[in-house]
Image (cartoon, rainbow, N blue to C red):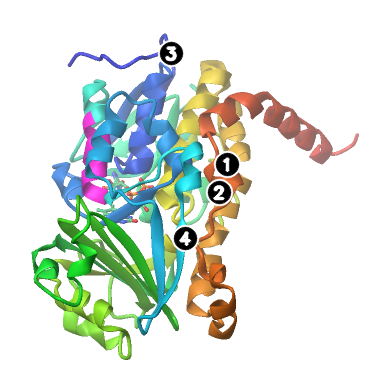
Amino acid sequence: MANNSPRRPPSGIKVIVVGAGFAGLAAAIECDRKGHSVTLFDKVDNIEEITRIGDIISFDPNGSVAFERWPGVVDQMEAIARQTKHIDLYHHQGKFVTRQDFSHEKAWGRRINGHRGQLHNIIYRHAVDRGIDIRLGKRVEDYFEQDSPPQAGVVVNGERIAADVVIAAEGVRSRGRKIVLGFDENPKSSGYAVYRAWFPADRVRNNPVIKHLVENGDTHQGFIGPDIHFLASTIKNGTEVNWVFTHIDDGNIEESWQFPGKPEEALKYLEGWCDVVHELVKATPDGRLIDHKLVYRDPLPTFISPKRRIALIGDSAHPFLPTSIQGASQSIEDGVVLATCLELSGRQNIPRALKAYEKLRYARVHRAQANGPKMRERWHKADWNEVWKKPEMIHLIRETWLLNFDAEKDAYDRFSIVLEELERDEQQIKPRL
Ligand SMILES: Cc1cc2nc3c(=O)[nH]c(=O)nc-3n(C[C@H](O)[C@H](O)[C@H](O)COP(=O)(O)OP(=O)(O)OC[C@H]3O[C@@H](n4cnc5c(N)ncnc54)[C@H](O)[C@@H]3O)c2cc1C
């Protein structure tokens, strides 16, 4: 396959990436751009197992800035993304509260909101077009790292495959965490689950209560109530509809992107909610609703293995709650920063690259992650006496430090600074003789 995408001269660094989700693909593409040689493994036999699935996913400017560097990708994404510049927020009984406008964020970059599987497929195809060695149907069973020769690797079908560095991007149930942490650690329930639906707009267009949502192109609205927020989008010029709402996790569903939900079950959580919300749920065709458990993990003490040759990225390192609207963007940033650190350190200094990666990412990722619960509480525990006086209280958290940010530039700018900091830290903890 011809590789027409710009690529730096070969760095001599061999990288194994585990997982072809957004994190793994971003890492693979960025490593390829920077001249490293990449082999990517995913357990699925056919990429459609993960490019057909899912519903709305959001990339903010700090994530989409990477896509701009991958030829052709952004144009394809824009063609299927939601075209809105604001969100309208309502009280759950139907009264309009406030419009939050995002027009001014254009200067920071693009917001790309669209179908997860379709956006994923665009990035996957780009990775294929670059000629990246992607091996499907390869479940990584274990990881290893060693001093002599200095290597890390994975075990696939009992075979040990080695490289200079391994990037573990296998999502929330990562096996890479064991070698990084030194023990097995399971995700916890966040206490919440999410109903998620995506379907053609026909039934909405024929329903007088909700047809206004699809008559004038794309729309985006949120309905806020006690312990529940309900978000609805219309997309592709109002021809497709997506809605999601969180509910308390009764403990009766599994963590899966394919666990079927039933509209009549979903409606039980929405007693007393307005007609628009009820009609949207009722308009959902059979088989188009999933009920997805939201798991969470406490921040890990580290993202990198003891010998500094295996790095966790994306949900393996830090699962996000959807209310942060940053899980996908942060997973892209991880891949960008790691590839850059490898470029700047060179093949002889892989452990330094991984230490710099962790230092560049750790505080930022956890600060972004903390916005998830904060935003959820802002909506679920809203004091409506105050909100009616000051509607901006329920606006989405949109912070400049987070969104107006180019992870690649930051890594180039701060790489040597963080290495000096790390060396200083190491000097300080060395015992005095
Ligand atoms: C099928 C699917 C659908 C999703 N849909 C949505 C959605 O609609 N909206 C949303 O906001 N988020 C969705 N997510 C989550 C979202 O994609 C992630 O939270 C975010 O993008 C970070 O991605 P990630 O690459 O770290 O992890 P993931 O997206 O979970 O990707 C992990 C990848 O690793 C592979 N893998 C796992 N274990 C192994 C192994 N042992 N060996 C080899 N490969 C392995 C998996 O097959 C998968 O491709 C979905 C995730 C998946 C897997």
Instruction: Name which residue type carries label 2.
Output: Val
Give the residue at mark 2: 365
Q: Residue at the location (20% across, 50% down)?
A: 236
Kind of residue at disc 3: Gly
Residue of label 3: 12
- Of tags 3 and 4, the one toward the viewer is 4
Three-letter residue code for mark 4: Gln
> CA separation, marks 1 and 2?
6 Å
Q: Nearer the viewer, mark 2 or mark 3?
A: 2
In the image, the residue with mark 2 has its CB under 8 Å from the nearest atom of ligand 1: no
| Element under disc 3 | loop
Between discs 1 and 4, the one toward the N terminus? 4
Q: Is residue 158 visible?
A: no
Residue pointed to by mark 4: 100
- Considering depth in this image, is 433 or 75 the residue closer to the camera? 75
Q: Give the residues drawn in magenta, as a range.
A: 116-125
Q: Are marks 1 and 2 in contact (CB under 8 Å)?
A: yes
